[in-house]
Image (cartoon, grey):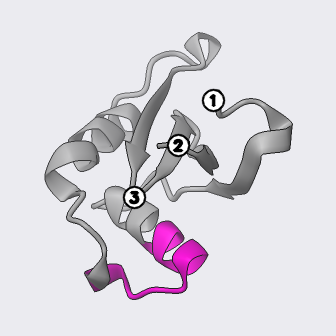
Amino acid sequence: MNATDDGDIIARRTLDTNRETPATEVVELVADLENREPTDLAPIYYTVNELLADLFSSPPRATADAAIEFTYEGYQFRVRQDGTTTVTSAGV
């Protein structure tokens, strides 16, 4: 499933690209979707935080339109360098 297929999108958000720990927003988003506490979810910091921090702190030129995709807690995330995020079901 591709996060760009509009019919499959569960949520769209713009992450704060200046946040010190950007993966925290991913956890908060999933907690909101699942109606759970962030502390009840699996740790994400060591797996995704560095990828997001690199994407946001040293982004490629805007014309590159860089993005990363990853799964977390049954959701597929696509995060662009400007913070635009789409969330779909990972279908796992």
Q: Of the numbered discs in the image, which one, if any, rests on residue 73?
A: 3
**Looking at numbered disc 3 in the image, what kind of residue is underneath it?**
Glu
Residue bearing the label numbered 2: 90
Q: Position of residue 11 (x, y in %)?
A: 70, 58
Q: Position of residue 56 (x, y in %)?
A: 41, 39
SS at badge 1: loop
Q: Look at the image and say whether residue 33 sits in the magenta stretch.
A: yes
Question: Residue at horizontal 65%, vertical 34%?
Answer: 3
Mark 3 or 1, nearer chain start: 1
SS at badge 3: loop
Magenta region: 28-39
Q: Residues within 10 Å of mark 1 (few under 14, many from 20)?
A: few
Given the current orientation, which residue lies at the most extreme front position?
92
Q: Look at the image and say whether residue 44 sits in the magenta stretch.
A: no
Given the current orientation, which residue lies at the most extreme top position?
64
Residue bearing the label numbered 1: 1
